[in-house]
Amino acid sequence: MSLRARINAPEEKAGRGEDGHLVASYRAKLLEEIDLAEMSALSPAERRARLERVLGHIISREGPVLSTVERAQLIRRVVDEALGLGILEPLLEDASVTEIMVNGPDAIFVERGGRVEQLPLRFASNDQLMQTIERIVSTVNRRVDESTPMVDARLPSGERVNVIIPPLSLTGAVLTIRRFPRSFTLQELIGLGSLDEPMLYLLAGLVQARFNIIVSGATGTGKTTLLNALSGLIPAGERIITIEDSAELQLQQPHVIRLESRPPNVEGKGRVTIRDLVRNSLRMRPDRIVVGEVRGGESLDMLQAMSTGHDGSLATVHANSAEDALTRLQTLASMSDVEIPFVALHDQINSAVDVIVQLTRFADGARRITEIALLESHGGEPYRLATAARFDALPMTPDGRVHGSYVHHPLPRRTADRLYMAGQPVPQAFGIAHSADQLATREAR
């Protein structure tokens, strides 16, 4: 969208009544004062600063008489409407907000600290909400209308955006913006209570010893955050290929290839799937493959890669428990266009997967690793999981907090041997099981 079109868009009231007209009036006056050719040559930050300065002169010259706070608020709102996303702009700048959810023009929710709250904000009309949505999707060369009522995209600044509008949505236009997660180290996650120090040492050893790890959890449990932290433990000399729907991983190693899937264009052509990227990555001489999330037939290609020489790979999957993660991987792999019996898929998972790290988001918003499970079964055996660590939660306290403790179990001899051969110590808190009776094992379907 051109600069003139963005500033001189149909009236987008920041509020209702006189307040909204004031914003619209000053936006029109701002357009009369600025040199569009000069503004187009500026960076976004310089453009915003110039508009704020010009608008300040207009208010000083023409009024109204405002307090310092009111003046700053008016300037901010007019410029936000002209260049930004109006009432959503302050939310995007608030680092504590991890998700913005707009359920029609009259309901705006945000997630902070794992908890969802409704804000006393609203769009002036459904038209204003649609104009804001169109402004967002235009930045990634997409459109949203009745012929294309759903859009899922990543903004240049990193946020993931999902839009669905009528007739598919019965509550009006729905906009969901997921903030780009800040990169955390495992040490920082200990400070947040997501795991304890013995678990950190175990996970570090498992990554460096090239165990294939699946991070499992429901939506919003912190799978991408943990995957990024685990990926940070991969040695700097290895060639890492990351594959994602929306690029969120922020690896710092020098030899990282980042791949991102692509949706079809407006003609329905040009789609590149996660599966296409996984297949292509196998021809790129990877040392490690990191898949942001497996959700379809690509899980078969991922499993085959894990079991044919690409050890140390990492992926996430949506599941509510370690057992569910195995079942879901099997189901997803069956969605491939290659017809493979369920029994063969079962064998493939037993051969490919070494570790499942289960994440849970508790009622108080805290995200924790609730289990580190080692897959001990072979071939056609039923899935057999050995719990290495788990979080035992206590009932919620009157202040709404969930407390508990981390419990550690002895590691199977096979796991200990692999760690030893890779030069990785077995953390003292775990130790080594000398008999099957010492293992916290269970079978899964």
Image (cartoon, rainbow, N blue to C red):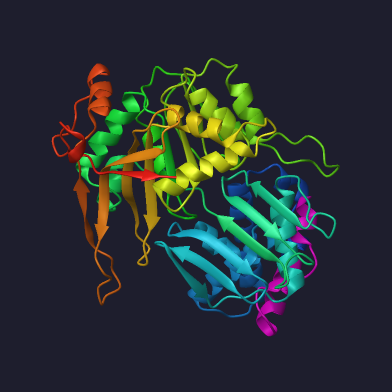
- Residue 112, given in percent of the width and then of the height, sits at 43, 63
Membership of 9 in magenta stretch? yes
Membership of 434 in magenta stretch? no
Rendered position, 421 above or below 250: above
Q: How many marks?
A: 0
Residue farthest bottom in this picture: 17
Question: Quarter-wise, where is residue 86 in the image?
Answer: bottom right
Residue 370 visible, this orientation:
yes
Left or right of residue 262: residue 282: left
394 or 244, which lies in front? 394
Say which residue appears at 58% left-offset and 45% top-offset.
Answer: 157
- Residue 331, given in percent of the width and then of the height, sits at 57, 43
- Residue 324, given in percent of the width and then of the height, sits at 46, 49
Left or right of residue 395: residue 68: right
Residue 242 visible, this orientation:
no
- Residue 244, given in percent of the width and then of the height, sits at 57, 37
Question: Quarter-wise, where is residue 145 in the image?
Answer: bottom right
Left or right of residue 198: residue 375: right
Quarter of the image where the C terminus is located: top left
**Which portion, as a residue range, is magenta?**
1-29
82 or 313, which lies in front? 313
